[in-house]
Amino acid sequence: MSEALHATDGVWLVVPLYNEATVIGDVVRTVRQTFPHVVCVDDGSSDGSGEAAAAAGATVVRHPVNLGQGAALQTGFEYALSVPSMRWVVTFDADGQHQVADVVEMVRKAQEEGLDVVFGSRFLDDRTEAGVLKKLVLRAAVGYTNLTTGTRLTDAHNGLRVLSRDVVSRIEITQNRMAHASELVHQIGRLGVRYGESPVHILYTDYSKAKGQSLWNAVNILADLILR
């Protein structure tokens, strides 16, 4: 096994999963070509998503009812912490919008630069095609998050992140809707750990937009931040 592949042994991908049966099998199979350890948290799906993820080789943990993405991430963190060999957790979306190559680069950056957290940012290069209004709303959300958490990020609401075992063990997500992303940033900021950002390509498809990556979803993120 090459050194690059060996470096993935301690990496676990945590994938919140809710009614993604049409794509999750392909997502898991693609990811596992590089990162074999994938835990999907089936958050009360009604379409067989958990079964599709398991058939593709993922470990599946189930919520009996839908609790929200924040709760699914927390469950995934707790599962990953139960694995003694886990050194890094990657939060990864189930709808196919994240790229494995970006995860490889983020893990490399964390390991080589001694970082505890690496946040993916779609605003550090021009690969991600998002509408002008969506960019404006997301940047407003980033500004609010930076102001209230003491962090300095360009993209605080990107679902692609790399977290060290130490950080995962010290995080407890209580916000279950979109505000969980800012809560996570806030907790990381309070820990005083070393963090950085890495450019990532978010692939917006008709499917992912229909599943919650629309402009309206960005507005909901901002509303959740202000009203939580």
Image (spheres, rainbow, N blue to C red):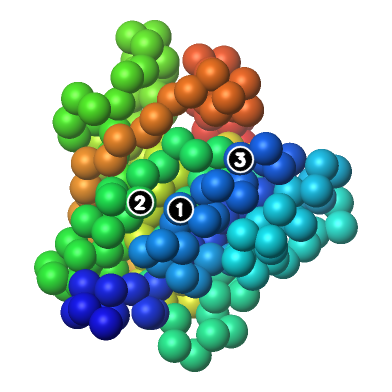
Going by the image, does 195 lie left or right of 97? left
Quarter containing the C terminus: top right
**Separation of disc 1 and disc 3 at Cα?**
11 Å
Query: Does residue 3 lie above or below 92 as drawn?
Result: below
Could you classify mark 2 by the number of other residues whose Cα lies within 10 Å: few (under 14), some (14-19), or many (20 or more)? many
Could you classify mark 1 by the number of other residues whose Cα lies within 10 Å: few (under 14), some (14-19), or many (20 or more)? some
Q: Is residue 173 visible?
A: no
Q: In the image, what residue type sits under mark 3?
A: Val
Could you classify mark 3 by the number of other residues whose Cα lies within 10 Å: few (under 14), some (14-19), or many (20 or more)? some
- Sequence-wise, the earlier of marks 1 and 3 is 3
Q: In the image, what residue type sits under mark 2?
A: Val
- The residue nearer to you, when weighing 20 against 148, is 20
Query: Does residue 64 lie above or below 147 as drawn?
Result: below
Instruction: Check if mark 2's residue and mark 1's residue have beta carbons within 8 Å.
Output: yes
Residue occupying the point 66% across, 56% down:
53
Q: Which residue is mark 3?
A: 23
Instruction: Check if mark 2's residue and mark 3's residue have beta carbons within 8 Å.
Output: no
What is the secondary structure assignment of the residue under circle 2?
Answer: helix
Query: Does residue 122 lie above or below 79 as drawn?
Result: above
Q: Is residue 206 visible?
A: yes
- Sequence-wise, the earlier of marks 2 and 3 is 3
- The residue nearer to you, when weighing 34 against 114, is 34
Nearer to us of marks 2 and 1 is: 1
**Separation of disc 2 and disc 3 at Cα?**
15 Å
Label number found at residue 118: none
Residue 77: horizontal and vertical position, in percent?
56, 69
Residue occupying the point 63% across, 28% down:
211
Residue 139: horizontal and vertical position, in percent?
33, 24
Residue occupying the point 64% across, 69% down:
59
Label number found at residue 30: 1
Q: Which residue is mark 2?
A: 100
